[in-house]
Image (cartoon, helix red, strand yellow):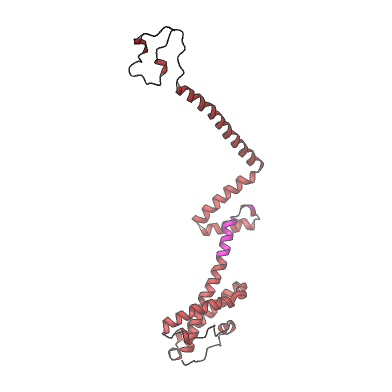
């Protein structure tokens, strides 16, 4: 093959080395294909497969929602109700109550309703425990600090009895675990008793000395105990 002149072997000044279209070639010889052209062909090939895959996924999703139209309704309602639950609890409660009255069970906010019901149950139990703690602490003071008995103590005892009765009336099932609640409340009441009176817990019985019936009886007032 005839050698190219020396000046023909020089690239154009300023041209990038990969731009082979500017490279001089022998007469009749085809120019080399640039590497970036091969890369573009490679990308186009796999871009086609990628777009085809996306198209199939979208088609399958559309087909699923067409076969299950209630799914879109459920997702929309759930999103709306959750935002309403976070934005306005009162309005959320009224809205779901109306859905229940109308029998539109598939539209109610089941998850948040379940959480609220569980929270209400725990709240009632916690309130009964707090009121029993206060009641027991005052009964202990009435019994062990008779010299300091006052109308204020009497009023607190009577008020806690009434409030506990209301809670039990609204939630009768709490009576099934009342002994456990009393036991837990008594431990807290002993701490309050010691803090307020300065009398050590060692002088108190290990278990609560009052039954639930006695604590709810307006005629029951512990007799004086001298330490």
The picture quadrant where one finds residue 128 is: bottom right
Residue drawn at x 52%, y 60% is 90
Please say whether residue 107 is one of the residues in the magenta stretch: yes
Residue 165 image offset from top left, x and y in percent: 57, 77
- Seen in the picture, residue 181 relative to 210 is either above or below; the reply is above
Residue range corresponding to the magenta coloring: 106-119
Dividing the picture into quadrants, the one containing residue 207 is bottom right
Q: Residue furthest left?
A: 13
Residue for point 50% across, 55% down: 86
Could you say which is closer to the camera, residue 149 or residue 33? 33
Residue 104 can be seen, yes or no: no
Residue 134: in magenta span? no
Residue 130 in sight in this render: yes
Q: Is residue 126 above or below residue 65?
A: below
Residue in the image at 58% along x and 48% along y = 75
Q: How many numbered discs?
A: 0
Residue 120 against residue 156 in the figure, above or below: above
Return the x and y of residue 120 as percentages of the image width and height.
56, 66
Instruction: Determine the main secondary structure of the stretch shown in magenta.
Output: helix
Q: What x and y, as percent, mark residue 169?
A: 60, 75
Q: Residue at x 58, y 34 (%)?
A: 53
């Amino acid at each position: 093959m005839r050698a190219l002149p020396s000046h023909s072997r020089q690239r154009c000044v300023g041209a990038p080395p990969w731009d082979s279209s500017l490279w001089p070639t022998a007469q009749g010889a085809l120019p080399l294909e640039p590497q970036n052209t091969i890369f573009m062909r490679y990308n186009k090939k796999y871009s086609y497969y990628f777009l085809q895959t996306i198209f199939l996924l979208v088609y399958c999703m559309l087909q699923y929602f067409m076969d299950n139209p209630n799914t879109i309704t459920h997702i929309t309602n759930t999103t709306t109700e959750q935002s309403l639950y976070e934005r306005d609890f009162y309005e959320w409660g009224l809205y779901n109550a109306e859905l229940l009255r109308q029998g539109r069970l598939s539209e109610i906010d089941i998850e948040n309703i379940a959480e609220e019901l569980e929270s209400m149950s725990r709240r009632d139990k916690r309130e009964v425990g707090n009121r029993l703690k206060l009641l027991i602490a005052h009964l202990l003071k009435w019994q062990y600090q008779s010299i300091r008995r006052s109308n204020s103590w009497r009023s607190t005892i009577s008020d806690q009895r009434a409030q506990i009765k209301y809670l039990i009336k609204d939630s009768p099932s709490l009576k099934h675990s009342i002994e456990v609640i009393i036991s837990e409340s008594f431990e807290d009441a002993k701490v309050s008793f010691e803090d307020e009176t300065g009398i050590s817990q060692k002088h108190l019985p290990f278990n609560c000395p009052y039954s639930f019936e006695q604590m709810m009886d307006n005629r029951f007032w512990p007799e004086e105990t001298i330490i």
